[in-house]
Image: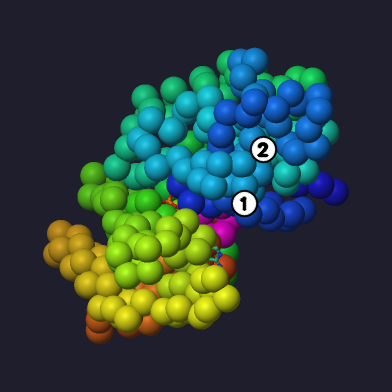
Amino acid sequence: MSDEFLGIDVGYGLTKTFNTDNKVVFPTAVVASSVNPMFSDSLVIEVDGDPYLVGKEAVHHTGAGEVRTVSFLGSPEWLAVLTAAILRHGFQSNAFENPSLTIGVPPRSFTPGMANRLKEVIAKSKVHCNQKRISLNKLKVDVIPQATAIFFAYLTEHPEDIDRNTIVVDLGYLTLDLVAFWEGRYLQESSESHTLGISILLDTISKRFFQIHNAVLDRFAAYDLLINRQIELFNQTVTLPDLDTIVRRYVKQVCQTIEIFMTKFSFPVHRGIIAGGGAGLLTTNGNGLMNRFMVVTDPIMANAKGYWRYAGDSHESV
Ligand SMILES: Nc1ncnc2c1ncn2[C@@H]1O[C@H](COP(=O)(O)OP(=O)(O)OP(=O)(O)O)[C@@H](O)[C@H]1O
Ligand SMILES: [Mg+2]
């Protein structure tokens, strides 16, 4: 039997979907398309009559398609990405009685008003793909604070930790999200979101690379350089001499932010868990505190998995 619950994490860097049938990852990139959808073999999503290319096609189209702005959430571009995620996942919402979708927003932006606004955007959407209307209004949508889902995903493997006081660190592309659970309760008031995601490091690497090699690196090439420590440029293999210093400086800033966050709590912290694309970077280069944190299984997928679990838990008995 197919799964009627779906978790979608529209991150600023990558969009992730998860349920028991499938999981999908693609770059969160979107551009207004000048291509007539009738003559394109790419996935063209029309929102209110305006066509958009989403994911790799958007990256190739313009070389960027970045969405690092606060106004992205709830915009037509965001709706195009969300629809592309549902379609690429192959989620056939029409096949179910109560298809349920859970998504997230950065914890600091989360308010019930904001959640309702996003639900309304989805319910009232006029979206088409290949001339076909995509009806999102049948979906039961929940919006929860991002990073809390990492704890829910973690609990699928460690159900005994449900009442443990837990700090969750989510180092994503744009944001560093920090949330806490005390005796199984989420502490919304203490949650924090900082613009300190891995893209800040990638920007510094690109800038330095340009100064030294006079060549522009996009976010994918900068990440490649970060991981492989070298990159091909005009038949040559080139490096960035001060890469280690740049990484160390960035990780130090992230660690300091986490340490300051932790001083808020007077209760003993039992578990520290990390997820997001920057998780490995933190534990490899971080200080002693970070060594006591545990990277969750499949750290990039963790939020999407947690959203899926939340959708299942809140709608299963309905
Ligand atoms: N295996 C990988 N493949 C691709 N990107 C990776 C990988 N590992 C780490 N990254 C980096 O992590 C980023 C994505 O991390 P993540 O999915 O946690 O961010 P996000 O959720 O999109 O961002 P935010 O939480 O700020 O909205 C990528 O943009 C890339 O820089
Ligand atoms: Mg994220």
Q: Residue at x 44, y 33 (%)?
A: 73
**Which is the main secondary structure of the residues drawn in magenta?**
helix
Is 142 a magenta residue? no
**Where residue 242 is drawn, which disc sits there?**
none
Tag 1: residue type?
Phe
**Where residue 26 is drawn, which disc sits there?**
1
Residue 112: image location, x then y, percent: 37, 29
Q: Please state, as top left, top right, bottom left or bottom right, where the C terminus lies in the image.
A: top right
In the picture shown, does residue 130 fall above or below 263? above
Is 302 a magenta residue? yes
Q: Residue at x 43, y 73 (%)?
A: 226
Question: In this view of the protein, which residue sits in the foreground, 134 or 196?
Answer: 196
* Residue 316 appears anywhere in the view: no
How much space separates mark 1 and mark 2, taking CA atoms?
A: 10 Å
Could you tell which of marks 1 and 2 lies nearer the N-terminus?
1
Start-end of magenta stretch: 301-305
Residue 108: image location, x then y, percent: 29, 42
Q: Are marks 1 and 2 in contact (CB under 8 Å)?
A: yes
What kind of element bears circle 1? strand
The residue to which callout 2 is attached is 84
Residue 58: image location, x then y, percent: 60, 41
